[in-house]
Image: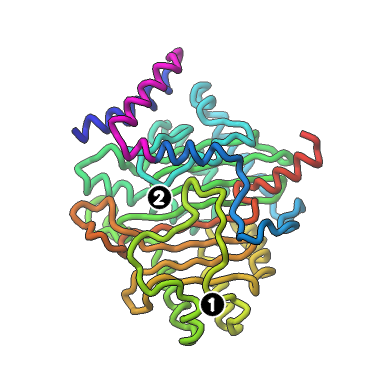
């Protein structure tokens, strides 16, 4: 039965890759697939419902804070990214390029989901479909856009999908190369463009305008967090994000901890800004960082940098300057206890950055789901509130100025 569901799930992708296929046949096949797989149908409906609304962004109930994101020169060249993207696109076949390239304001930006490939159809061309040379150039684009740390973390996340494949008897739902690239707009030094990497537990949206970069939404997660067998035994993820977060919470005074704590009970999954959550009202919660000591503020900035430092050198500093400018209007909130082996959720939220870390219930590791959050399944999210995910606010300003 499971094999049949997997084949059904892959059929629309196979059909779409062939030329001269009647779109009505593809759509009918998709409908039949979703009827056979109610979980897949659920995610498809979530996405369709989300896309009915035009993008606005994530705001508090007080509404948008204007003037946060301005078009300006950062002094950090993006030419290496542009050149890497051009080389990657040049080596694709015409059919691959057709599947990979979209307009700059296409809703493809918003078509991403962190679940496995058995229950979500992705756009673009996967690493698995590429030739060795194409794959090399795809990674050159990712390498040019990320820091060495960000690139390694991305590769390590991909490795966890290979581990899940091994743990699930070779299931086609998982694979270290089932990660799909799309490019929005045409790589340019003056016009807006960007790229997206979409796959299980790894989603990067990367917008570029001149020498400005917006890397969000970013979803990075993994299961298992510590791999104890198979091809990638020893692969380990998110220990600093976990341990630094707990250390920060434990460094707070008892009164500060009380104010930061939304709930002492961690019973389920807590992330608010995952897939299909582009337009939500999310108020500040917990403790305002203006109440932190200088040492506590620095500890928080170090924690934030763990997430920001996945972007390429130079642009990490640009983003951190933006974060520091709003540090006193940043909020830190916590769900769970503070024991050494605690499972927990924390959120860092300011007008210019939203970071979430969550210990999730085990899903992919067989016979390990006891219905409780675990340190062996982690989700992290990085967003740009106030309407600048996907660089949307910069894109709006650019279009207004140049009358697109």
x 57%, y 67%: residue: 284
Residue 384, position as x, y percentages in the image: 60, 55
Based on the picture, tell me whether residue 34 belongs to the magenta stretch. yes
Based on the picture, tell me whether residue 150 belongs to the magenta stretch. no
Q: Real-space Cα distance between discs 1 and 2? A: 27 Å
Q: Is residue 401 left or right of residue 208?
A: right
Task: Give the mark nearer the N terminus: 1 vs 2.
Answer: 2
Q: Which residue is mark 1?
A: 299
Residue stretch in magenta: 19-42
Prevailing SS of the magenta stretch: helix
State whether residue 330 is above or below residue 13: below
State whether residue 216 is above or below residue 291: above
Q: Quadrant of the N terminus?
A: top left
Residue 365, position as x, y percentages in the image: 24, 53
Q: Secondary structure at mark 2?
A: loop
Q: Secondary structure at mark 1?
A: helix
Residue 48, position as x, y percentages in the image: 48, 36
Q: Quadrant of the C terminus?
A: top right
Q: Quadrant of residue 2?
A: top left
Q: Quadrant of residue 42?
A: top left
Q: Tell me if mark 2 has few (under 14), some (14-19) or many (20+) residues whose alpha carbon lies within 10 angstroms of its own.
A: many
Residue 311, position as x, y percentages in the image: 56, 56
In contact (CB < 8 Å): disc 1 and disc 2: no
Q: Foreground: 207 or 32? A: 32
x 54%, y 51%: residue: 217
x 59%, y 54%: residue: 58
Q: Which residue is mark 2?
A: 201
Q: Is residue 228 left or right of residue 17?
A: left
Q: Foreground: 15 or 134? A: 15
Residue 133 visible: no
Residue 361 visible: yes
Coloration of the structure image: rainbow
């Amino acid at each position: 039965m499971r094999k049949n569901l997997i084949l059904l799930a892959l059929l629309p992708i196979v059909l779409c890759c062939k030329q001269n296929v009647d779109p009505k046949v593809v759509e009918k096949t998709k409908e039949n697939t979703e009827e056979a797989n109610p979980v897949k149908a659920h995610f498809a409906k979530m996405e369709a419902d989300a896309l009915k609304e035009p993008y606005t962004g994530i705001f508090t109930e007080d509404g948008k804070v204007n003037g946060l994101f301005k078009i300006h020169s950062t002094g950090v060249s993006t030419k290496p990214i542009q050149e890497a993207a051009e080389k990657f696109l040049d080596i694709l076949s015409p059919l691959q390029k057709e599947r990979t390239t979209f307009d700059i304001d296409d809703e493809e930006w918003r078509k991403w989901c962190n679940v496995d490939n058995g229950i979500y159809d992705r756009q673009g061309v996967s690493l698995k479909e590429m030739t060795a040379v194409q794959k090399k150039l795809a990674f050159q684009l990712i390498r040019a856009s990320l820091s060495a740390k960000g690139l390694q973390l991305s590769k390590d996340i991909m490795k966890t999908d290979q581990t899940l494949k091994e743990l699930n008897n070779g299931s086609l739902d998982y694979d270290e190369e089932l990660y799909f690239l799309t490019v929005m707009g045409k790589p340019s030094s003056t016009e807006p463009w960007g790229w997206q990497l979409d796959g299980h537990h790894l989603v990067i949206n990367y917008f570029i305008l001149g020498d400005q970069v917006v890397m969000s939404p970013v979803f990075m997660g993994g299961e298992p967090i510590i791999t104890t067998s198979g091809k990638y035994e020893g692969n380990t993820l998110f220990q600093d994000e976990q341990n630094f977060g707990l250390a920060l919470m434990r460094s707070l005074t008892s009164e500060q901890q009380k104010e930061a704590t939304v709930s002492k009970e961690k019973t389920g999954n807590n992330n608010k800004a995952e897939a299909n959550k582009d337009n939500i009202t999310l108020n500040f919660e917990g403790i305002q960082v203006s109440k932190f000591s200088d040492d506590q503020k620095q500890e928080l900035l170090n924690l934030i940098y763990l997430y920001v430092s996945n972007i390429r050198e130079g642009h990490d500093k640009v983003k951190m300057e933006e974060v520091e400018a709003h540090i006193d209007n940043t909020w830190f909130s916590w769900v769970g206890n503070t024991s050494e082996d605690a499972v927990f959720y924390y959120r860092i939220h300011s007008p210019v950055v939203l970071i979430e870390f969550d210990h999730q219930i085990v899903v992919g590791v067989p016979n390990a789901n006891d219905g409780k959050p675990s340190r062996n399944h982690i989700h992290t999210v990085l967003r740009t509130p106030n309407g600048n995910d996907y660089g949307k606010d910069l894109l709006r300003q650019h279009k207004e100025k140049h009358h697109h």
